[in-house]
Structure formats: structure tokens, C-alpha cells
Amino acid sequence: MPIVNMKDMLQHAYHHGYAIGAFDLVSLDFLEGIVLAAERARAPVILSLAESHFEYFDFETIMPAVEAAAKRATIPVAIHLDHGATLDSARRAINLGCNGVMVDASQLPLPDNIEATRKIVEMAKGCGVPVEGELGYVPGVEGEDAERHPGEISYTTPAEARAYVERTGVDFLAVSIGTVHGRMKGKPKLDFPRLKQINETLNIPLVIHGGTGLSDDQFRRLISKGVAKINYYTALSDAAATQIRENSRTETSSGYTGLVKDVRGAIAAEVERCMHLWGAAGRAAEVLAQCQPWLPVEHLIIYNVEGLDRAAAEKMMAKGREVLSAIPGVRAVFTGEAVQEDARYRYTWLVRFCHPDVIDSYREHPDHVAFADNLFRPVAGGRISIDYLAVESKQ
């Protein structure tokens, strides 16, 4: 089954009164446990990769595995960058396969947060990728994620939320109403009246960061007031750590594999519990029916060169690979030369776009325009250019 449009997925959850988990993963055990739980629960799921966790894995290395797991799944999946640091973080995440992004500028003053987020939205919209913004500040209190979110809580206000959404164009908004990153200390006190006002003001899917430690009733109340996406990590990390500690007591002669035995199952159990609690279980078929599949586009050019020898043509193509691969929404750039000596067209470009929207944004991007006008078009007469959408069937 193809990866699905994340905006469609969260709109469905918002309008049908349930929430989808965005479960942060830090290893293949987490990835496999999350997908296993979603399959068992027949639930849509968001595979989330937080830039604050990049010290635990190489983003570029793990993304092919995340994409492969998502494409192989039989339930709707989206892939999300969580807490990106910069505009370039979002561009890189999109080019590596994320179809949802969140760049966290919530620590900035409101005007700066709006300006930074607006730039992310402008770039991502050209790639067909929805954007999550954050307004207010969700601090860390205790646990491994706490140190990454220092400072005091700053609550989201309905008036600022309206201005922020209108001026940035974000698709979803993460709000601060009393949750914390990491573990709660004491009984959580959430400002539900504030959340209700924000929801009535915006009417877009809302997001809660810091879901660990909330009660079942609090989760249900959050969802009833517009929360359609819940970020969840610390409880998964704790479940994995508990299993490893148990293994260390019982598997005293084992090495690494003995210590991590059943970690995937422990993670899957907690994820599946959340999916049932949040109302996502059993929704896979209806979500798939309502969501657009996330399919790439192949931009194909076949051409001959005039006035360049082979070495100069290869130099031009090398420059193109360098320049074009950095444009937002470009997944890969392939250049090739015909195997047959008598081929009508000697050379080819195959540029993979993450989404059909990239056809226009790529064409108009200044780096593409400069390369095409100055280095490519003057020597590539009689070329043929076609864009192909992948043809895949829903399972």
C-alpha cells in the first residue's frame, strides 16, 4: 500500500473524533514495533523522526528502512519530521522521504516564530507537504527528552493562535495547554477550556506534544476538543528499557541480541494500547479510502548535446546533479548515456519528485532556471520532456 497524504489522514481523524499517534522512533526495533502494532490494531499511524534524536541514528541511513516499512504495510502510514531545527532541516527531510514536517520555532517571539514558520510553509507547499507549527512552549520536566526542552511553559492563547495560523498557513497546530516533554511530575493539570477555545477559533487539527503520563480520561477529553495527532515517545522508551532490564536479569549469558530480545514486542504493546484508547484502531480501511496515496513523479528528459564533447557533457550533467538534487521535493537525480551506439537520443535525465506539486515549484525554482538557461538548454536541442506519475494500486 502506498504512503498516504498526511493532511488527508489528520483531517479524517479531526472530523471523525479520534487521534492518530505520531510515534517517535530511534531504531529498527522501534520502527518494527510501531508498524506491528498498527497492523494488529488496523490503525493509521505516523512514523515520526525527531531531529533532537539524530544523535541516536543517522537520518539518511534510517530513512530508506522507514520508507520500506511504510510501503510494505497494509495500513495507512505517513512519515513525519518532528522538531526540525531549520528550513534546511525541513528541505532535507522532504528530499529523504518525509511527507509531513514540523520545524519548531516556538521558543522565538511570536513575530519571529511566524516569519520562520511562514518560510517553511512556502517551501513545503511547493512539495505538496503539510506543515505542523507550534505556538506556545512545551518544556521538558523529567526523562531523556527533558533536557532538550529547557525553560518554563508558555501557554497558547486563542487570539495568538488565530494570527499565527492566518499568517503562516500551517495545516496543523501544536498547542501548549499543560503537557510536558518527557515524564510528568505529579498529576497533570491540563487547561481544557483553553483548548476548547483554540479549537473553536481555528477549526484545524490540533497536536499535543508530551503525551506520556496523561490519564485515559485526559486523552479522551483532548480528542473531544480537537486534538487529532498525539506525539508519543517517552513511554515507548521506558517500555523498551524495562524489557532490556528484565532481559539482563534472565539472559545473564547473552550478548546484545539477548538483551534486546522482545523489545519490539514491548514497544508494540504500548503503541497498540494507545491506538485503541485514542480511537484509531479499526480505522485503516476508511482512512485509506479517504486519503490520496503519496506517489512520486518521474521527470524524464531525453536529449542530444550540440557543441560539447563527451567530457564536457559529463561535466554539465555532474553540475546538474549537484544543483538539482538540492531543490526542495527532489528525491533523486539520475543522468545516463544510451547503451546502444545508434540510439536516437544519447543522454537522459531522470529526476524523481516526491509529489506532483513539485512539477511547478521545480520548474520555477531559481537554481533550476539558472542551470537550465545557462548550462543545459543552450546545448540540448530537440529534447523531449515528460512527467510520469507512478501507477500503484491500493491494497
Image (cartoon, grey):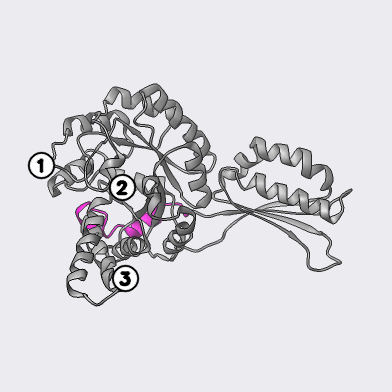
Q: Which of 55 and 202 is in front in this view?
A: 55
Residue at 28% x, 45% y is 145
From the image, tell me which residue sits under label 1.
186
Residue at 46% x, 50% y is 98
- N-terminal label among 1 and 3: 1
- Residue 229 is covered by the magenta coloring: no
Query: CA separation, marks 1 and 3?
Result: 35 Å
Please, which residue is most extreme toward the bottom here? 253
Q: Which amino acid does label 1 sit on?
A: Gly
Q: Residue 256, which numbered label? A: 3
Mark 3, Cα crowd under 10 Å, few <14 / some 14-19 / many 20+, is few
Q: Residue 163's quadrant in the figure?
A: top left
Q: Which of marks 2 and 3 is in front?
A: 3
Q: What residue type is labelled 2?
A: Ala
Q: Looking at the picture, how far across and down is residue 57, in whole percent?
A: 41, 55
Q: Which of 157 and 278 is in front in this view?
A: 157
Please, which residue is most extreme toward the front here? 253
Q: Which of 279 and 102 is in front in this view?
A: 102
Is 245 situated above or below 10? below
Label 2 secondary element: helix
- Residue 290 is covered by the magenta coloring: yes
Query: CA separation, marks 1 and 2?
Result: 30 Å
Q: Which of marks 1 and 3 is in front?
A: 3
Q: Looking at the picture, how far across and down is residue 318, in whole percent?
A: 72, 51
Q: Looking at the picture, how far across and down is residue 253, in whole percent?
A: 24, 77
From the image, tell me which residue sits under label 2.
13
Mark 1, Cα crowd under 10 Å, few <14 / some 14-19 / many 20+, is few
Label 3 secondary element: helix
Start and end of the magenta stretch?
A: 275-293
Is 336 situated above or below 250? above
